[in-house]
Amino acid sequence: MKVLLVDDHLLFREGVALLIQPLATPLEVLDAGSAEEALARLQQHGDIDLVLMDLGMPGMGGLGGIAGIRERHPAIPVVALSSSDDKPTVLEALDAGAMGFVPKTASAAVMLAALRLILARGIYLPPSVFLAAEPAAARASAGATLSPGQAVAAQVGPARSPRELGLTPRQADVLYLLLQGQPAKLIARTLGLSASTVKAHTSAVLRALQVTTRTQAVVAASKLQLQFETPLPAAAAAE
């Protein structure tokens, strides 16, 4: 597995690189000090599996970097990292195309568990997205009593599968790729479906989640703790 870690602080990059070593064996961690450097790295290395992107960087910044990766490398999941986890910041990252959001204030155990969840085709968002009305101190106090696994679950109930929402396997595939930020044309090409079929499936999955946008879908999927299987090859399933 190959992970690209993007942050303008060398010490933070070195620390996180050590922290995430248990994610896979072997694990190669590449690093970049800016979003611009990250895009160059991705151009050089076509086999990167995951990008961790700090939001607070000079230049084009983390949001610009996420948007650039979504445009040029839409199949690579991007996880936003930030010292702030307020709801507007999280939603901005999701709007840019992030697949998950891990606060820098999270413990090492929570960060590892969150990244494992994302690599297992789940979505992790901090509890602040769902508990924004509570004071930060109250959220921190509540989180202190939780195990890493419980914290990553965002205190919203047991994990569910797309099938439990009434989605077909193909609709689940479309939903997963939509959550990754992939455009309709790429989803159609990836799954071997027509543009009209992708549009119909997209409408169905948004209705099932009772949302109208991708960002709302990411939040809803995280709250439901949806777990996805690997999308089927195009030839293995009918429309």
Image (cartoon, helix red, strand yellow):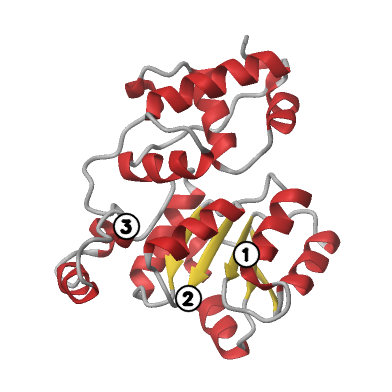
- On the image, which quarter does residue 65 sit in? bottom right
- How far apart marks 3 and 2 lie (CA) works out to 17 Å
* Residue 29, x across and y down, in percent: 64, 70
Residue at the spot 57% in from the left edge and 72% down from the top edge = 55
Element type where label 2 sits in the image: helix
Location of the C terminus by quadrant is top right
Residue at the spot 21% in from the left edge and 43% down from the top edge = 157
Which of marks 3 and 1 precedes in the sequence?
1
* Residue 33 located left or right of residue 177: right
Query: Label 2: few (<14), some or many (≥20) within 10 Å?
Result: some
Q: Are marks 3 and 2 in contact (CB under 8 Å)?
A: no
* Residue 49, x across and y down, in percent: 65, 54
* Residue 30, x across and y down, in percent: 69, 72
Q: Badge 2 is on which residue?
A: 19
The three-letter amino acid code for the residue at tag 3 is: Val
The three-letter amino acid code for the residue at tag 2 is: Leu
Which of marks 2 and 1 precedes in the sequence?
2
Label at residue 152: 3
Element type where label 3 sits in the image: helix
Q: Are marks 1 and 2 in contact (CB under 8 Å)?
A: no
Looking at the picture, tell me which residue is in the foreground, 96 or 9.
96
Q: Badge 1 is on which residue?
A: 63
84 relative to 52, above or below: below
50 relative to 110, above or below: above
